[in-house]
Image (cartoon, rainbow, N blue to C red):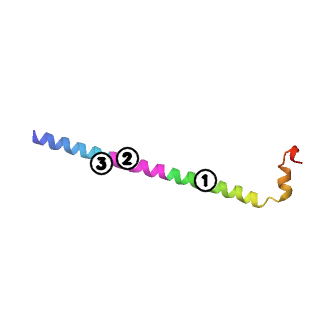
Amino acid sequence: MKVQAQHTETQIKEQFKKLHQFLEEEEEARMAALREEEEQKRRMMEEKMEAWRGCSAPCWRIHSSPQEL
């Protein structure tokens, strides 16, 4: 009876170790995806800001509606 209980305890501990490892890997994968998404958004914002910096007054007029002219 004691041997069976020890065997069951060992199995439970092994299952929890596997679950813990899985969760750590899942966390790392999600964090990496989040960092990549943040980097993409940062690059997109930098590109937009750069485009705006290069835009002079005539550029703004091109984007104006006919009512504003």
Report, in whole angstroms, how far the alpha carbon at label 1 lies from the one at label 2: 27 Å
Q: How many marks?
A: 3
Residue under the image location 29 percent in, 45 percent down: 16
Q: Is residue 60 above or below residue 11?
A: below
Mark with earlier residue (2, 3): 3
Whole-number angstrom distance, CA of label 2 to CA of label 3: 9 Å
Tell me the element at label 2. helix
Q: Which mark is residue 22?
A: 2
Residue at figure coordinates x 21%, y 45% from the top left: 10
Is 28 left, or right, of 42 in this rendering?
left
Residue span colored magenta:
19-31
Question: Residue drawn 50% across and 53% down?
Answer: 32
Closer to viewer: mark 1 or mark 2: 1
Q: Residue under label 3, please give it.
A: 17
The CA distance from mark 1 to mark 3 is: 35 Å
| Magenta: main secondary structure | helix
Q: Which mark is residue 40?
A: 1
Q: Residues within 10 Å of mark 2 (few under 14, many from 20)?
A: few
Q: Amino acid at mark 3?
A: Lys
Chain-order first, disc 1 or disc 2: 2
Q: Are marks 1 and 3 in contact (CB under 8 Å)?
A: no
Q: Give x and y (percent) for residue 64.
A: 84, 48
Answer whether residue 23 is magenta in the image.
Answer: yes
Residue drawn at x 82%, y 54% as measured from the top left: 60
